[in-house]
Image (cartoon, helix red, strand yellow):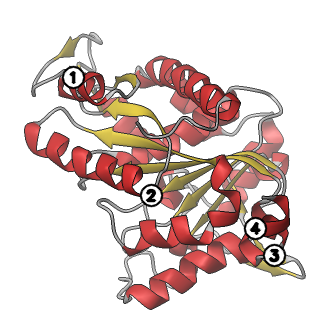
Amino acid sequence: MASVTQDTPVGRRLRHIKHIIIVCSGKGGVGKSSVSTQLALSLYASSPTARVAILDVDLTGPSIPRMLGLDGHPVHQSSDGWVPVYADGSEARLSCMSVGFLLKKKEDSVVWRGPKKNAMIRQFLGDVRWGELDYLVIDTPPGTSDEHLSLIEHMAPVRDRLSAVIVTTPQAVALLDAMKCLSFTRAVNLPVLGLIENMSGYVCPCCGEISNVFSTGGGQEMARREGLKFLGSLPVDTELVTLLDAAEVSESQAQDEAREGASFKILSRYKNTSTAPLFSKIVEEALQSLQNHTSDPSLSSS
């Protein structure tokens, strides 16, 4: 495995990354990008030394830059490749890369065919100066398309570090699409850390009570039926939605925030939401599952 890793540009670039977690969903609109953002923030907060990066390969709908308050930040070129954008400023423990950073205007559309998408993903993996990381979280587009196949193909040299998290909502149509996503992971032998049921209930912004506006429990039942670990359920939290939707700050503001203290404000604001403690438990379950997969490589997506 080590020799293969050294033989490819992507393998050489990713060889210092311990764990790569691909976040996927069967359909759009289930909150996959918000889950990816929370996963990156929670992993960052899990240890004072944790180094985390988030790669946005939802090429036609990049939303990670805005959720992290990084819209409008430029990507710089160095002698060692592209320098990712650091969400935590001078600490440089949470980096991000997205096609959103490369657009002249954030409302510009990305109209690309498969080969160009494939080339962009290869460039993200092989040309970005990721450095040493504990976790690389990859936010993918909904479904199972060119982007997913490109990821699996290009990261073949580091397959032993790959795993996935599946995101669904409790409704029957979302669960059906989540099954297709699970089928994909099994077809490519990608280990699944577990399943998250998002939008399971609604958090009242006044009293904090959770009401089941939609159905609930479908994701947990799917996990039980398919032999997956159920990582947990997340309600619709208007406070979180507002935070991630209005997280945009200027580059000078981000630098000012970095000078003010050890943590950046998006993280401190996130910790004050009702969802943060719920997601912290989800991360604990995911890390336990990750440890199990690492100690027993024969485990896969079941």
At 37% from the left edge and 29% from the top edge, which residue is drawn? 228
Q: Nearer the viewer, residue 61 or 130?
A: 130
The local secondary structure at tag 1 comes to helix
Marker disc for residue 11 = 4
Residue wearing tag 1 = 221
The kind of residue tagged 4 is: Gly
Residue mark closest to the camera, 3 vs 1: 3
The kind of residue tagged 2 is: Val
Within 10 angstroms of label 2, few (less than 14), some, or many (20 or more) residues? Answer: few
Find the residue positioned furthest to the front.
Answer: 298
In the rendering, at what x and y percent does residue 9 appear?
77, 77
Within 10 angstroms of label 4, few (less than 14), some, or many (20 or more) residues? Answer: many
Which comes sooner in the sequence, label 3 or label 1? 3
Residue wearing tag 3 = 7
Marker disc for residue 188 = 2
Which comes sooner in the sequence, label 3 or label 2? 3
Residue mark closest to the camera, 3 vs 4: 3
Q: Is 280 rendered above or below residue 294?
A: above
